[in-house]
Amino acid sequence: MKYYGCDWLVRPGADYACMMHTAQALGSRLVQIEVKMSEAGCIYYVLALDVPDETVLGAYIEQAGQFLGMTEWYPISAEYYQQGELFLDVDGLAAEAPDILEGVIARLDADGYHNRQYCG
C-alpha cells in the first residue's frame, strides 16, 4: 500500500459525501491527520489516502479532487498515515447522529468561509 497526503484548503459547501464515497469506491480510506494554519491565516486540513498504486490516486483526483481543490498530493509514511482518523463518516453519522453530522459540516464550512475571507 502507498500513502499520500494533501494539504487541503477548506472550502465552504464542499461535497464531503463525494470526498468519502469516491475514496470508498476506489477501495481507499480518506483520513484526517491534522489541521494547520498558515502564516497568512489559511486553514488547511492534512488529509491522506491509502492506495495500492498511483493510478488509484489519479482516479481519486479525477473523480473528486479536481472539484474540491485537492490536486496536489505528496508521498507520506505509513506511520504518519496511521496517525489519522476517518475524515468524516457521512453515512454513519447521517443514519445514527444527524445532529452531530450537521455540527461537523457547519464547523468545516465555517473554516471554509474563514478561508474565503482571508485566503482568497
Image: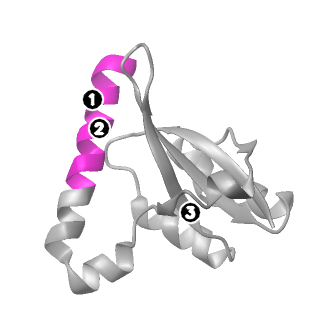
User: Is residue 55 placed above or below 66 in the rendered structure?
Assistant: below
User: Is residue 84 placed above or below 115 in the rendered structure?
Assistant: below
55 to the left or right of 73: right
Q: Give, as a single range, the part of the protein colored magenta.
A: 105-120
Taking depth in this image into account, of 119 and 80 the one nearest to the observer is 80
Q: Hey, which quadrant is residue 35 in on the image? A: top left
Q: Residues within 10 Å of mark 3 (few under 14, many from 20)?
A: many
Taking depth in this image into account, of 7 and 57 the one nearest to the observer is 7
Taking depth in this image into account, of 35 and 23 the one nearest to the observer is 35
23 in the magenta segment: no
**Could you tell me the amino acid type at mark 3?**
Leu
Element class at badge 1: helix
Residue 13 in view, yes or no? yes
Q: Residue at x 53, y 58 (%)?
A: 84
**Could you tell me the amino acid type at mark 1?**
His
User: Gap in Å between the C-alphas at discs 2 and 3?
Assistant: 19 Å
- In x, y percent, where is residue 118? 32, 18
Residue pointed to by mark 1: 114
User: Gap in Å between the C-alphas at discs 3 and 1?
Assistant: 23 Å
Residue pointed to by mark 3: 30
Q: Residue at x 41, y 39 (%)?
A: 10
Labelled pair 1, 2 in contact (Cβ < 8 Å): yes
